Image (cartoon, rainbow, N blue to C red):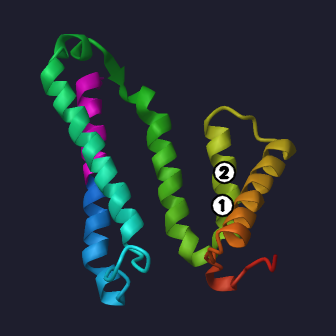
Amino acid sequence: MIIRKRHINWLIVLFFVAIVAVVFQQIHTSMSEQGIATGGPYDNAAAYPRYIAILIGLLVAFQVFSRFVNSDEAGDSSTEYSISELTRPMFLLLIFGIYLGLLGVLGYHLTTAPMILAIMVLCGVHPSIYAAINALLIAFVLAYAFEVFLKVVLPGGIFSLNIPW
């Protein structure tokens, strides 16, 4: 099966539109029900995701507008991709989806290092003890930065694993 570049561009646009839609859906449903999507910008947990979603929406609108203004689709339609060339991006999304699904169940410390290692292997790093050590170091450095500097409590999962920094 052959996929043209303009089809991929429209899939990317639809993906980011879906992200923006999910953010606003979450703000207006679950965050509102929890009482954290009301109030001023300093005490409103929905302010940051809302502004990021608006920024993504504006960038997507700019991309679509520039596509129509330039409308040089002849150059884009001549570029073709086969499904096999899109397997790596699809697997990257799949790995990230599995990670997000397991994050609440197993917690940050049991899911992040394997996810980083899987992405490294998918991107061409040969699995070795050094790749595993690098994945562990990246996961722990990120955990330290989020928990110590940003005061974010990372999910502990069913085992309630948290590191007392």
| Residue 20 % position (x, y) | 29, 57
The amino acid type of the residue labelled 1 equals Thr
> Which residue: 61% across, 76% down?
155
Name the image quarter holding residue 163.
bottom right
Instruction: Find out whether the residues at labels 1 and 2 contact each other: C-beta distance under 8 Å.
Output: yes
Q: Which residue is mark 2?
A: 116
Left or right: 115 with respect to 2?
Answer: right
| Residue 124 % position (x, y) | 66, 32
Closer to the camera in the image, 106 or 19: 19
Instruction: Decide: is 149 above or below 45.
Output: above
> Which residue: 74% across, 53% down?
138
> Which portion, as a residue range, is magenta?
1-17
The amino acid type of the residue labelled 2 equals Ile
Closer to the camera in the image, 83 or 76: 76
Q: Which residue is mark 1?
A: 112
Left or right: 12 with respect to 93?
Answer: left
